[in-house]
Image (cartoon, rainbow, N blue to C red):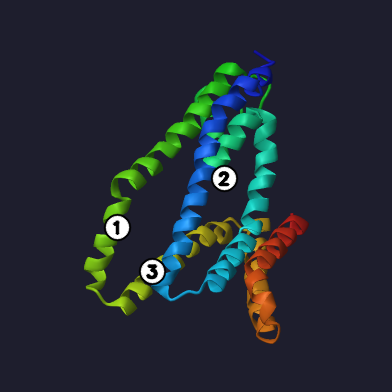
Amino acid sequence: MSDYLQVANDPMLWLMAAPGIGIVALQAVLFSKKAFNAGQYADLSRSEAWKAFKVGAISAIGPALAVFIVMLGMMSVVGAPITWMRLAMIGSAPTELTGATMGAQAMGVEFGGPNYGITEFSASVWTMALNGVGWLLFTGLFAHRLTGIRDRISKGDDRLTVEIGGAAMLGAFAYLVGGHLIAGGGRLIAAVISGLAMIALVYISKRMPKLLEYNLGIAMIIGMIAGVLFT
């Protein structure tokens, strides 16, 4: 079926995707409210909480741009409704694109190729959906137990808890960046340049404190531009 995009962009799919997006939006509002309410337990004033929220929103601009670019490519193949729903729920553009590609390959065709039709489109959608089920199940079944595990490891030492959290974040980000460093090319350039830009911005922020909250977003944008120019 060569005109499968008529199905992929059908209004019914928009209606089917909307509830999932609504739940994500509701969760964002509820989590934000809980975060603001929890600020009092961390001795954060309302203004400090808003400043932290602003820093997080600005820092999200860089990753959001990367997702937006991949989103445009996915929309041309799997349609706008499914792309909108998957990236809103998972937020990892490379993961969703890989899932869609693997679904097409399982059917023996190239993702977005001449033989990619309604059946292959369905396989891509199912692969993306099933790939995300594991994350959601683990979060729902075990997320509430992680606090107890953390407390057992740290044995109630607040300083150790902070160190464990910091080490976990460093490990996670090192893992994410490591793949780009190994890949080389534009990805390597983007990672290195954004890292150097972040170092420079930290020093500049000592003289211009108001710049501090924009550092991460600016560094990401600089890295992406450098990677594109190199490629």
Marks 1 & 3, CB-CB < 8 Å contact: no
Total marks in image: 3
Q: Which mark identifies residue 165?
A: 3
Counting from the top left corner in percent of width and height, residue 48 is at 55, 73
Which numbered disc, 2 or 3, marks the residue closer to the eye? 3
| Residue 205 vertical position relative to residue 184 in the rendered view, above or below | below
Mark 3 closeness class: few <14, some 14–19, many ≥20 residues within 10 Å: few
Front position in the image: 212 or 172: 212
Q: Amino acid at mark 1?
A: Leu
Residue at numbered disc 2: 94
Please give the name of the residue rendered at 62% of the width and 70% of the height, measured from the top-left corner. 195
Q: Position of residue 92 (x, y in %)?
A: 54, 46
The picture places residue 166, in percent across and down from the top left corner, at 42, 71
Q: Is residue 171 visible?
A: no
Q: Residue at x 55, y 25 (%)?
A: 16
Disc 3 residue type (three-letter): Gly
207, 39: nearer the viewer: 39
Q: Which mark is residue 83?
A: none
Q: Which quadrant: the N terminus?
A: top right
Taking 88 as reference, is 60 above or below it? below
User: Residues under labels 2 and 3: Cα distance?
Assistant: 26 Å
Mark 3, secondary structure of its residue: helix
Relative image position of residue 89 (x, y in whole percent) = 51, 41
Q: Secondary structure at mark 2?
A: helix
- Earlier in the chain: of badge 2 and badge 3, it is 2
**134 shown above or below 192:** above
The answer to whether residue 78 is seen in the rendering is yes
Front residue (pair 190, 69)? 69
Q: Which residue is mark 1?
A: 146
For the residue carrying disc 1, how many other residues have a C-alpha within 10 Å: few (<14), some (14-19), or many (20+)? few
